[in-house]
Amino acid sequence: MPTLLLRFPPVCLVPVARLAALAVVLLALSLPTPALRADETCNSPYLNKLIQGQEDYLHVWTLGVEGLGDGSDKLVTVDVNPASAHYGKVVDSVSVGGRGEAHHMGFSDDRQYLWAGRLHDSRIFIFDIGSNPAHPRLLKVVDDLTRRTGYAGPHTFYALPGRMLIGALSNSKDGGGATGLAVYNNRGDFVAAYPMPVATIGGVRGDGYGYDIGINPRKNVMLTSSFTGLNNYMAELATLVNDKAAMQRFGNTLVLWDAKTMTAKKIFKTPGAPLELRWSPNGADDWAITATALTSQLWLIKQDALGEWQSTAVAKIGDPAKLPLPVDISIAADGKSLWVNTFMDGKTRLFDLSNPQAPRQVYEKVTGKQVNMISQSWDGKRIYVSSSLLAHWDKKGADNEQFLKLFWWDGKQLHEQWKIDFYKEKLGRAHHMKMSAAAPGSAPSSTVLLGAR
């Protein structure tokens, strides 16, 4: 899948250029999509050069902690191939300077580059992962998101052909949740901006909030979810939950877009901050699922018998009254099961999605005193769990564990294989994870890199 090497002027304020940029995005979304076969199940469908088999490395976007090591945010690389002499060990760490609330990452469509963002200062870091996955190299810092768009808090990095679609959480005007989407090319040049809707569409008024992105190219549908703005996510959690006005400033909607024209077509009421969006990777399915953080529910997004898209609450996660705070979900490659991490009780739960309209919890395990992100390998056997949510939301004292763990799933139970204590290693707070593989022949691995299709 070729990378388009066209340059564009700033387009958020130039109507003609905006139309040109829109046409390019439309063309990119119309290109054939690769078969969704990857090292992990929660990637953009436009990703190529995908891993088949055992991953070699896990990259962890890590929040710096003052007085711990160099104190800076960093990309930590862990060797995760059992055939390696360094299995379960940190093999590299690339500091980016300062602390800006390191949060999420995403690969470019050619899988050569890993984009990572910070929620506080809105800086974006582009790492070369493809040349030497064991030792990533920082290539570029993108610091014009807010200047170009007015958006702040780059959160989701979602690969398009030759492009990166970025979902933001906030704005530079008032630090609230009104925000939007931005498109950059793979070199890190700004292309276009699209505000989250605040108008009434399909009888539901938009709240303008953003969080995650999920595209189904076959249906030409993009979904976006919603969270909260900088004023909330940078506040201390104990202060926030006792502020009634602040607790009203969380997203309560999902938005369905025409993926080619980037036009909002429908808004769904989804109370309680719907976070991660996961389309079923099963080619026979055309539904997506999300979890609401504050109301602790799974929601299914699916077409009804008349072909209309609907969003429906289909299951509770734990006891919503105890606010377990679902934070990340990972769907199986066959779309038949879903892992859910809940931050407050430190549990990892498994739901049976054989009937996605009636998910059933079939397993749970306490995997830490606090847990956040969860990623599973394509074969569903390896489950990676990290600990940090947000610097000001993480627990205090002995409950403030900061780790990366690998679990083996035998079909019935999770078995811990190893743990890296990020505080003991003076690394910081472990957050988002992405898997990668060594180039063929460069490591004692069974990993095969699939070429672009």
Image (cartoon, rainbow, N blue to C red):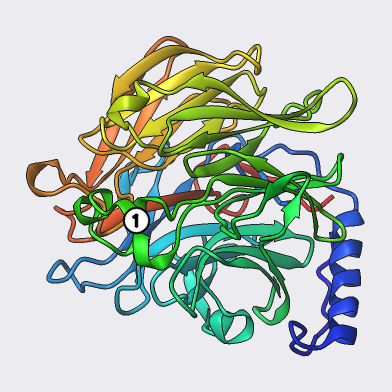
Q: Relative to residue 421, is residue 382 drawn left or right?
A: right
Instruction: Tally the marks.
Output: 1
Mark 1 — residue? 245
Front residue of 93/311: it is 311
Front residue of 143/450: it is 143
Q: Amino acid at mark 1?
A: Ala
Q: Residue at x 60, y 54 (%)?
A: 439
- Residue 177 drawn at (x, y percent): 50, 63
Q: Residue furthest left?
A: 397
Q: Residue at x 48, y 73 (%)?
A: 137
Q: Relative to residue 194, is residue 258 drawn left or right?
A: right
Asked if residue 39 is positioned above or below residue 174 in the image, the reply reads above
Q: Is residue 110 visible?
A: no
Q: Is residue 303 visible?
A: yes
Q: Relative to residue 111, is residue 23 drawn left or right?
A: right
Front residue of 447/417: it is 417
Asked if residue 214 is positioned above or below residue 161 in the image, the reply reads above
Q: Residue at x 45, y 19 (%)?
A: 350
Indicate the quadrant where residue 145 lies.
Answer: bottom right
Q: Residue at x 14, y 41 (%)?
A: 399
Q: Residues within 10 Å of mark 1 (few under 14, many from 20)?
A: few
- Residue 105 drawn at (x, y percent): 51, 59
Check the picture and name the quadrant holding the N terminus.
bottom right
Asked if residue 345 is positioned above or below residue 202 in the image, the reply reads above
- Residue 119 drawn at (x, y percent): 42, 67
- Residue 272 drawn at (x, y percent): 47, 40
Indicate the quadrant where residue 270 lies.
Answer: top right
Secondary element at image label 1 = helix
